[in-house]
Amino acid sequence: MGLMPRKPLLCLDFDGVLHLHDGVWRGAAVISGPAVEGAMEFLASAADRFDIAVHSARSGDADGVAAMREWLAGALAESLGGDAEAARVLARVSWPTSKPAARVYLDDRAMAFAGVWPSLDDIEAFEPWHLRDPQGARRSGETAMKAERRLAPAGDLRMAEAEDGEARLVRGYAALYNSASEDLGGFTEVIAPGAFRDALGGDTRALINHDANMVLGRTRSGTLRLSEDARGLAVEIDLPETQSARDLRASMARGDVNQMSFGFTVDHDTWDFRDDGTTVRTIHHVGELFDVSVVTFPAYPETEAALRSLEAARPPAPAAPAPSLTLARARLRLAGI
């Protein structure tokens, strides 16, 4: 069989371009995430016009290359409907161990250089697309793994009159201290007093149902004011003259809407594994507060990140006791040894 004609070379990074990486390195051969949405379909189309090189931080390890090959074969077969189409694409893929001379490079951690040097501040602030929250707020390190949302147990979210007598203020609490949450999937949660002390200086939005298209206020503009008191995280929002805000006022006046939710990351927490089998998580320090949202229909709390923290904190199970010498000798006699 003759060699396939050469085409322009397109070089792709692996993690964050093909494989949806969570930002935590577990080893060159450990690949556990799904494919980036649309990645396999893109490869199928690109294979008609390019030779494709996959070059990654995993490429310097033979086991890492083997793991990438195996993962890509499975992802292609699943997305494209069979092994035959996957094999067609894989025939165009090479796995260089050093950076190849490509026509174009696609890398989630790259900044395009067009002859103008970026500022060092821009470089320092850069984050890959998959390590940002849905509203584009920066997350760094493992905070991408820890973004969570919670429904506040407070039921006293209310409207208040502005100076002109019009009901355009929303006041309430986005979180209460020392108040046990509902069961979050094997544990309950408590927020310690002062947990938000370092999160209030950020640029937090007030939203409806965590929808970035329905902004009620923002701390940077002064239309959202956040503060801590003995009870919890107090919220005050100057409602805008938008249709969504007018609808919200009407729903709150009827008593149909009276709860809040908040999106956050955790910098410090502790876990109490109690003798009665219950587990309590205490949040001592919130890292970033992305948004506080008035919610019309509370969704189930997003607990995946907290569950990962739970597994990391859980004490290891006690090792099984070693068999006694007498028992070991008995097993040897039964085996005829």
Image: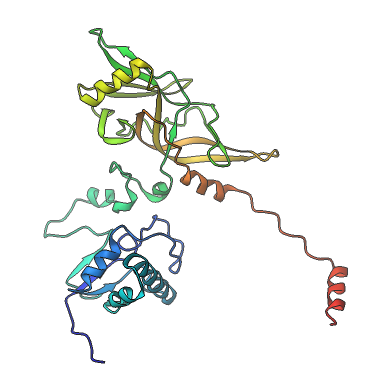
- Residue 267 x/y as whole percent: 45, 41
Q: As drawn, which residue projects farthest toward the bottom?
A: 1
Quadrant where the image shows the C terminus: bottom right
Quadrant location, the N terminus:
bottom left
Identify the coloring: rainbow
Q: Position of residue 6 (x, y in %)?
A: 18, 82
Picture layout, residue 94 above or below residue 161: below
Q: Where is residue 135 in the image (x, y as percent from the top left)?
A: 29, 41
- Out of 36 and 273, give the one closest to the viewer: 36
Q: Which residue is drawn at 39% across and 48% down?
A: 144
| Lateral position of residue 11 relative to residue 72, left or right | left
Location of residue 154 with respect to 264 vertically, above or below: above
Q: In which quarter of the image is residue 64?
A: bottom left
Query: Looking at the rendering, which quadrant does residue 256 occupy?
Result: top left
* Number of numbered discs on residues: 0
Q: Tell me what residue is drawn at x 78 percent, y 64 percent.
A: 322
Does residue 212 lie above or below 103 as drawn? above
Q: For this view, does 169 lie left or right of residue 115?
A: right
Work out whether 200 lies above or below 40: above
Residue 185 in picture, x, y percent from top left: 54, 41
At 38% from the left edge and 58% from the top edge, which residue is drawn? Answer: 21
Res. 182 image quadrant? top right
Outermost residue, left side: 115
